[in-house]
Structure formats: C-alpha cells, structure tokens
C-alpha cells in the first residue's frame, strides 16, 4: 500500500502566465482521499487526468504545432493551461489529493521551475490521509514514439524511477546530457524541482515576434545563445535535462497518482509524446487494477 497525502493548509502562489501574460494565482488546498488532483476556476472544475487533456493551444501561434504546455478542459469547456510544473511538484512530493483553485487562464510560471510550488507547500506542510492505494506491478513494458528515436519507455520495476536523456545534436549549445529521479520527495526537491524551463535564442526571438514572453528577459528566463546561457547562470550543467524530467513527471501525473512501481526512460521527448505516454500508462495501470 502506498499512502495518500494532501497539503495540511492552503498554499498560495501568484504571478503571471507564460503564454497568455495574464495575471495568475493558484491556491493548493487540502482534499479528501481519492479526490485526485482537482483544478477549479470559479464554478468550473475537473480532475487533472489524461481524459481531460485539452486540444486547444495556449496561444493562437501554436495552433499547428505540437503541444507547448499541458492543459485540461474544465467542466464549462474552458481550458486551464501550463499545469505541468505544479503537477510535477505534487507528484514529486507524493501528494495524491489536492484542490488547485486557479485564477487566470494559466498556472503562474514564476521562475519556470517547480521550486516556488515546493516552497509554498513546505510553508503549510503535508499530511497523510486515512486511505492508501494498492499498486500491483505493471503487466509489461510500453513504448510510445519511435522505438529507435524520440520515445518514452515504461518498464515494470521494483521501485519508481524516471530518467530523461537529452541530445540536440552536433553544434548545439546544449550538450548531450541525462537526468534521473529516484522516486523520493527529497531527491525531487533538491535535484529536480529547481530546474528551470529554457529555450534556444532563435526560439525566443520567434516567440517575441509573436508577442510572447513580454515580461521576461534572458536574466530571468534561461535562453541559450551560441555560446551558452545569455545573461544567466545554470543551476547545474545538466539543468535542461533536469527540467525536461520535471516536465515528464508532471505530464505523466495525468495518468493518476500515486505512480506505480516503474522505470521510465525518455529520449528527447516533449509534451505531446508525454501525453501519449500518460494515456498508455493509464491504460496499462487500469488493466493491472491500479486506477
């Protein structure tokens, strides 16, 4: 049995949205065992599961692109965007049940990491719930994507771990690198949560031309130029791989929490492939009686 957990008080984070530039605020509130992670905006609400994944883009410019963030459709049909970092924080700390009361179209981006959510939760604490989740082993391996290229592999294991392998190819300012999570809250908090979102200089310039990232500069948003980060310093040399792992954890949380015992290996994947992996994990875990 894996214990269910919620927050012990109301944790608050506020700022603005990465893609909409709109004011944003979220309260992480306690919830009953079995509630899951519920997102509420006014009277509209939804459990954050892969079945609620929105197909709408966070910005009109992304209409013909793969997903640039993760969002779900609420009960009134409106989307709640950029939920991957807060879902990652909850999953990383082992929180299975919480109500996310959201104001604005997106969860606040803050510094592009999950650390602000960790800090907010640490201020109020967490508590065990009077229930547990039985998680039998998965019934076999699952691979989504190209078996020899960009992919996510999910393997049955004795314990939870996730690994991300990043390689942009020759000439990239981001070298080949990997990151891993051993499944523990301590490892997540210290080695994964502080990793910030990033982009390449040509991507940032293209986004600015579309009117995005108006409030951000390279000093508070990691932008890689030809020689490395511009006006910024990496928290680790492999911070990009750690952030991609952070995103992976948050995206896979849509399959349901807590995670079963498994080893996840991701190779160069992004949100769109993570969503496919979450759907596959949901199906495999369902067959095993875990959701």
Image (cartoon, rainbow, N blue to C red):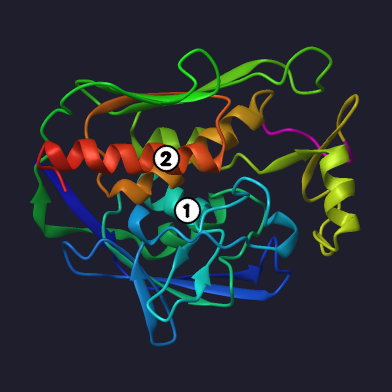
Q: Are marks 1 and 2 in contact (CB under 8 Å)?
A: no
Query: Residue drawn at (16%, 48%), measured in percent from left and top?
Result: 291
**Does 233 lie within the magenta span?**
yes
Q: Residue at x 85, y 63 (%)?
A: 211
In percent of width and height, residue 110 lies at: 65, 59
Can residue 193 be seen from the camera position used here? Answer: no
Q: Give the image location of residue 25, x and y in percent.
A: 56, 74
Q: Which mark is residue 276?
A: 2
Q: Secondary structure at mark 2?
A: helix
Label 1 crowd (10 A; few <14 / some 14-19 / many >=20): many
Residue 118: which numbered mark, if any? 1
Residue at (26, 43) in percent of width and height: 282
Q: Main secondary structure of the magenta part?
A: loop
Q: Which residues are magenta?
A: 230-235
The answer to whether residue 116 is left or right of residue 5 is: right
Relative depth, front residue between 35 and 6: 35
Q: Is residue 255 above or below residue 138?
A: below
Q: Is residue 37 above or below residue 12?
A: above
Residue 18 in percent (x, y) is at: 69, 60
Frontmost residue, 212 versus 187: 212
- Real-space Cα distance between discs 1 and 2? 27 Å
């Amino acid at each position: 049995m894996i214990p269910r957990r919620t927050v012990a008080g109301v944790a608050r984070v506020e700022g603005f949205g990465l893609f909409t530039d709109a004011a944003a605020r979220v309260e992480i509130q306690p919830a009953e065992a079995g509630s899951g992670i519920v997102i509420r905006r006014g009277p509209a609400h939804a459990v954050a599961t892969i079945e609620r994944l929105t197909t709408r883009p966070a910005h009109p410019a992304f209409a013909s692109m793969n997903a640039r963030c993760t969002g779900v459709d609420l009960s009134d049909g409106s989307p709640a965007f950029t939920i991957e970092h807060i879902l990652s924080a909850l999953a990383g700390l082992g929180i299975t049940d919480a109500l996310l009361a959201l104001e604005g179209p997106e969860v606040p981006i803050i510094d592009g990491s999950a650390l602000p959510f960790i800090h907010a939760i640490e201020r109020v604490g967490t508590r065990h719930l009077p229930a547990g989740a039985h998680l039998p082993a998965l019934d076999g391996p699952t691979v989504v994507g190209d078996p020899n290229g960009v992919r996510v592999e999910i393997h049955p294991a004795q314990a939870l771990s996730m690994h991300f392998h990043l390689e942009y190819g020759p000439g990239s300012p981001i070298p080949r690198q990997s990151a891993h999570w051993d499944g523990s809250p301590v490892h997540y908090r210290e080695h994964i949560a502080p990793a910030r979102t990033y982009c390449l200089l040509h991507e940032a310039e293209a986004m600015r031309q579309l009117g995005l990232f108006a409030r951000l500069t390279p000093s508070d948003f990691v932008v890689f130029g030809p020689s490395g980060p511009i006006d910024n310093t990496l928290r680790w040399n492999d911070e990009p791989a750690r952030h991609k792992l952070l995103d992976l954890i948050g995206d896979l949380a849509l399959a349901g929490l807590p995670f079963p015992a498994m080893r996840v290996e991701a190779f160069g994947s992004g949100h769109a492939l993570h969503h496919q992996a979450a759907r596959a994990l949901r199906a495999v875990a369902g067959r095993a009686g875990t959701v």
